[in-house]
Amino acid sequence: MLTGEALVGEHARLRERVQRLFARFEASVRQSLKVAQQQGGVAAGFDPAERARWLLTYASGSLALRGRVDARVSSGGDEGALLALLG
């Protein structure tokens, strides 16, 4: 449902609520990254807004993948490598 596939043909209000959920999630991540930046916990040139968008893209893609793939199928354990690319 969070990936939007289950919302096809559903009421627009429900789709808007899911979109707001993801917007709040992105805002929370962005704020956390801004705090890390202020505390010197990230490298120079770090853009919290851009990084939050990338992390949200990763999260929504993972949700979509898990929704289409049998839950018993292993992800291959490559989450660490993927997050390192984002980090």
Image (cartoon, rainbow, N blue to C red):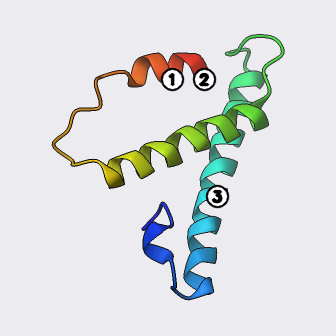
Question: Residues under labels 2 and 3: Cα distance?
Answer: 20 Å
Q: Using the rendered image of the protein, determine whether residue 15 is visible from the camera's viewpoint.
A: yes
Callout 2 touching callout 1 (CB < 8 Å): yes
**Vertical arrangement, residue 66 with respect to residue 3, above or below:** above
In the displayed orientation, state which residue is furthest to the bottom: 11
Kind of residue indicated by mark 2: Leu
Residue identified by numbered label 2:
86
* Dot 1 and dot 3 residues touching (CB under 8 Å): no
- The image quadrant where one finds the N terminus is bottom left
Kindly state the secondary structure of the residue where label 2 is placed. helix
Residue 24: assigned label: 3
Q: Secondary structure at mark 3?
A: helix
Look at the image and tell me in which quarter the C terminus lies. top right
* Residue depicted at 42% across the width and 19% down the height: 80
Relative image position of residue 11 (x, y in whole percent): 56, 88
Q: Hey, what amino acid is under mark 1?
A: Leu
Who comes first in sequence, dot 1 or dot 3? 3
C-alpha span from label 1 to label 3: 21 Å
Q: Which residue of the protein is positioned furthest toward the left in this rendering?
A: 72
Mark closest to the chain's N terminus, 2 or 3:
3
Counting from the top left corner in percent of width and height, residue 52 is at 68, 38
For label 1, count other residues whose C-alpha is less than 10 Å away and answer few (under 14), some (14-19) or many (20+). Answer: few
Q: Nearer the viewer, residue 67 or 79?
A: 67
- Residue designated by label 1: 83
Residue neighbourhood size for the residue with mark 2, other residues' Cα within 10 Å, grouped as few (<14), some (14–19), many (≥20)? few
Image point (61%, 85%), residue name: 13
> Could you tell me the amino acid type at mark 3?
Arg
Q: Nearer the viewer, mark 2 or mark 3?
A: 2
Between 80 and 34, the one lying in front of the other is: 80
In percent of the image, x 34 and y 48: which residue is there?
A: 66
